[in-house]
Image (cartoon, rainbow, N blue to C red):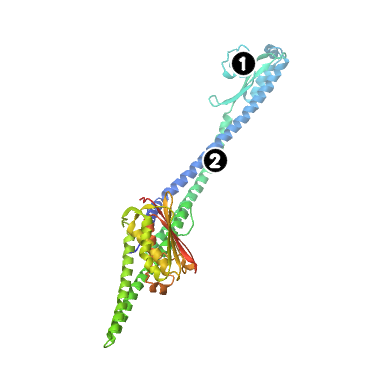
Amino acid sequence: MFRNNKIDQFRRKHYRLHVEFVRCFRLLRSNTLKMFVITAVFGIMSMLIAFGVAHVTYKNSILSSETAVVQTEAAAISGDFTSYASLMDAEKAGIYNLLIQYSSLNSIRIRVVNTNYVIASDSYSIENGKTIVNSNVIKVFNNGKSVSEASQTTGNIEAVVPINGNSGEMLGVLVMNMDYSAIESFSEQVSDRTDTYGIILTTVILALALLFANISSSRYKKAFKVVEDVASGHKDKRIEMKGNTELKDFAFHFNQIMDQNNELDESRQEFVSNVSHELKTPITSIKVLADSLNMQEDVPVELYKEFMQDIAKEIDRENKIIEDLLALVRMDKKASPLNLSSVNLNELLEMVLKRLKPIAQKKNVEMLFESFRPVVAEIDEVKFTQVISNLVENAIKYNVVDGWVHVSLNADYQYFYVRVEDSGIGIPMESQNKVFERFYRVDKARSRETGGTGLGLAIVKNIILMHHGTIKMHSEENIGTTFTLRIPLNYVE
């Protein structure tokens, strides 16, 4: 009944968080199979890519190594021609026959090409006397540098090196080709073995994916069970701070909300208890006074009047409590409007102090008002008057005889500031963080003597919050108390 806007926002946030988590968890719980499939597919695809890259890398490594060997051998053979002045001299010396023998032993085709691009010798005796059209041969004739490559198109490793005579002149080029089908065959055998390992790893990955899905799902199931228990009324349940980051964050906020909710319930129960007690106290006094009159015969008029005056005071006190409670209820409503207008705060403060001057004179309390500049602000004049009246009246009531109350007004380009300072009895340190709570009294006996309901400062704070302002308090026992207000000059929704 007496919840304020912050409590409403808190509960709406709690409800939205609860609903959203339930929705998300039910989706996750129904998608456990999807989590398993996603994890399994990701693991298997990663394994296949890794095996594929390893296979290609291994094959390329072998080809690179064999290509280097073929080029080295081709260079060594071409070095045998450096003792001759021409290819014909080399042929007469039996070099070509040696090439045929070497080719037969190593399964390598060797061709000697002269400067006219004619094949002078083919160890396979297929293209003798034919013209060769080969890009690598052309490159070597043009720049005189060796070329080697492994061609996937032809399936051969080819090395082309220049042949230089004893005079250093290029006599031709030597073309050496080796079929690398044996390397392909060996690579396929390795691939077959890796496939076997892949099946084993796939089984392991599927088992781990299932385990991961179950673990992830179980953590959410535990969290959801706690949420269900809380929804069933077990408000002492809390979610363990375990799992992934998202679940930990949710657990932290959920537990925090539940702790705040418990505090709110305790505060509400205490508030209801306080309301009952405060409303019951004047009624009890009235009944005691009335019973005292009824139990006596021939009651003197003076005593009758005295009792009736006491009853009237208790009724006034009851009425004041009810009025303050209704004021809080009206301010707690979200739609509670502010009757905003441009108000001259200098005049308003002077009017409030003038009205409270008789109360101050009874205790011989001096009231001072200090204004640093003219201030006009957009406020609810009636409600803000209630704020200043409450603070100044408290400063007078809880002051010492021959004390003082100092009220000051200042402003900048955005806010105006009101300070209410007194030389009163002060507030103990342990009570300072509770003075804005409803029905809280530092000294209950003295508060009742002065007619306080314990709702004044709660009303003050609510009105200031409605104006988007702030209130701060500083107090020292037997020295005094200072309240400082800061409120925007222009109200903004």
Label 2 CA crowd tier, 10 Å (few <14, some 14–19, many 20+): some
Residue 467 higher or lower than 170, as above or below: below
Residue 3: which disc? none
Kindly identify the residue that appears in the image at 32 percent across and 53 percent down. 341
Image spot of residue 468 (x, y percent): 39, 54
Mark 1: which secondary structure? helix
Query: Mark 1 or mark 2, which is nearer the start of the sequence?
Result: 1
Looking at the image, residue 362 sits to the left or right of residue 337; the answer is right
Image spot of residue 316 (x, y percent): 31, 72
46 and 335: which one is in front?
A: 335
Residue 182 higher or lower than 17, as above or below: above
324 and 171: which one is in front?
A: 324
167 and 492: which one is in front?
A: 492
Q: Quadrant of the N terminus?
A: bottom left
Residue 198 higher or lower than 94, as above or below: below
Q: Amino acid at mark 2?
A: Thr
Looking at the image, residue 277 sits to the left or right of residue 155; the answer is left
Quarter of the image where one finds residue 154: top right
Kindly identify the residue that appears in the image at 26 percent across and 88 percent down. 298
What's the CA distance linking mark 2 and mark 1? 45 Å
Mark 2: which secondary structure? helix
Q: Amino acid at mark 1?
A: Asn
> Which residue position holds label 2?
194
Residue 457: in sight, yes or no? no
> Which residue position holds label 1?
142
